[in-house]
Amino acid sequence: MIKKGEVNINDKLLEFSYGQFTCDIDVFFYDDDVLIRFYDASKEQSEEKITDLVIVDPGFGFLCLKLKGESALLSGYLVKDVFVSEEMVSAAIDFIEGLSPKYKNIYIPYHIALVKQVGYVEYNGEY
């Protein structure tokens, strides 16, 4: 399980792990705010493979942490079939809060939607 402060943001490829589950993450910073994308890098297409038929995998979810004065707000969505327990969601929360010392010991209310895919809209270059 990830503990606060154990994340090295200088790593080229970051991972989130909980129990037997591991996935890749992208971390995006804007000032003191941070956004994390959870995904499987093996499903990402390289630039050379982006031609006619492209399948864009949406990943396993996003979390966004925004600093608001002496507090912060955490929101986002996670795929329910992947984030299967409250403990796993808590580990994802701990992970994003551990990315910056500015989030240590401050009040952070959150609302994270657990979603199930029921359909999709896509443009893949074929039509």
Image: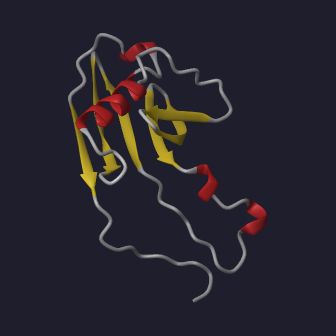
* Residue located 33% across and 54% down the image: 81
Q: Residue furthest bottom?
A: 127
Identify which residue, 34 or 119, lies in the foreground. Answer: 119
* Residue located 26% across and 50% down the image: 114
Image x and y of residue 121, in percent? 41, 76
Image x and y of residue 123, in percent? 53, 78
Quadrant occupied by the C terminus: bottom right
Image x and y of residue 108, in percent? 25, 24
Q: Residue furthest right?
A: 48
Quarter of the rendering containing residue 98: top left
Residue 42, compared with residue 54, is above or below; it is above
Residue 53 relative to residue 63: left or right: right
Residue 6 relative to residue 109: left or right: right
Residue 50 relative to residue 103: left or right: right
Q: Residue furthest top?
A: 105
Residue 5 relative to residue 107: left or right: right
Image x and y of residue 2, in percent? 43, 23
Residue 31, compared with residue 39, is above or below; it is above
Residue 66 seen in the figure: no
Quarter of the rendering containing residue 87: top left
Residue 8, compared with residue 35, is above or below; it is above
Quadrant occupied by the N terminus: top left
* Residue located 37% across and 38% down the image: 64
Residue 104, compared with residue 122, is above or below; it is above
Residue 115 seen in the figure: yes
